[in-house]
Image (cartoon, rainbow, N blue to C red):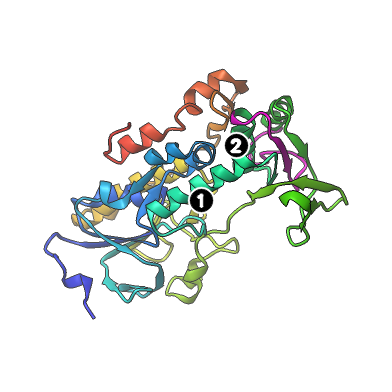
Amino acid sequence: MENPAEWGGGRGRRVVVIGGGVAGSLIAKSLQFDADLTLIDPKDYFEIPWASLRATVEPLFAERSLIHHKDYLVNGRLIVSKVTSITHKEVLTADGHQVAYDYLVVATGHYDPVPVTRADRFEEYLIENKKIKAADSILIVGGGPTGVELAAEIAVDFPQKKVTLVHDGSRLLEFIGPKASDKTLEWLKNKNVEVKLMQSVDMSSNTNTSGGNRTYFTSSGETIKADFHFLCTGKPPGSEWLRETYLKDRIDNFGRLKVDENLRVKGHRNIFAVGDVTDIKEPKQGYAAQKHSLVAAKNLKVLMSGGNESKLAKYEPRSSPKIIVSLGRQDAVAQFPFTTIIGLVPGMIKSKDLYVGKTRKKMGLNPK
């Protein structure tokens, strides 16, 4: 079997990054000229996740938000495969690679089974978009940021559709303050979205009725008729595979990797973790994941150049981060440390382009 440790070499330390999401792709891009770098990801592209809901109503938007790893990774190695195990010196992949490392970065985010190729992911958006266009009524299950943003996108682009959102919590967007939740609920109601709180939907019991319309049953005994549904409930951390590995003792009860202030996995001097898979106490946001990557990249450069550990940068989570949830193409709800606002002003910050141009620029690509 070929050993990638023998490929190309000579470019210094071997760094392996597992996971090509927000955090993994940025750290791979940042280190590709400083290390002998390998990125291992189960798919051949990076997707800007906060743009995915816009792509559902406007598939062409995904042309810019789905990025081939090879477009930004011009000086590194890409292995498109799942990782099956890690030891203290190498990473094993499902397709049979054994990749030796001097430094390892775990950036596996949340578990989210998506197609392997960019073309298939794009096709998925086209299919979902056709379904939305053909439907008269749509059910959305889950009132976190994904469910709320999707309901808003559909309500704005397809105002004639009947949209119902069911959430098991007492308010929408529970990760931010109640004021923002109330304003969001009011905004959705004004757009004729029917919101049902404190209820869950029994996904196993929905039945087909005539004309393709389905009947769904809620926990409080209500029935909802809809042509199809989107499930927007939380995704588990992408750490299940780690439970059989060398890092199994470093996973907390929530499935997150325990890291120190330098973003190293506790007890390991040469293994870092970044993004949503870490146990850092903060909202799991793309903005924070990008920050993790920049701090960890800086620290890896210090270590690879033989620098002193006292020079390592510390990651400090923001105590009250600004949070913006987009509501369709123009509006958004924003929670800043001292105030909460809804409407066009926060919408101007995020909703038009959803930071896609900004993110592409960060990855060294044309924003357009």
User: In the rendered view, does 41 fall on the left or right side of 109?
Assistant: left
User: Which of labels 1 and 2 is toward the front?
Assistant: 2
Q: Amino acid at mark 1?
A: Ile
Disc 2 on helix, strand or loop? helix
Q: Is residue 107 visible?
A: yes
Dominant SS in magenta: loop
Q: Position of residue 113 (x, y in %)?
A: 50, 60
The residue labelled by disc 2 is: 149
User: In the rendered view, does 23 fall on the left or right side of 3?
Assistant: right
Q: Residue furthest left?
A: 10
Q: Is residue 283 visible?
A: no
Q: Residue at x 21, y 53 (%)?
A: 307
- Residue 139 found in image quarter: top right
Q: Residue furthest front?
A: 211
Residue stretch rendered in magenta on the structure: 157-178
The N terminus - image quarter: bottom left
Q: Residue at x 34, y 74 (%)?
A: 95
Disc 1 on helix, strand or loop? loop
* Residue 167 - label: none
The C terminus - image quarter: top left
Q: Nearer the viewer, residue 49 or 254?
A: 49
116 is higher (above) or lower (below) than 55? below
The residue labelled by disc 1 is: 280
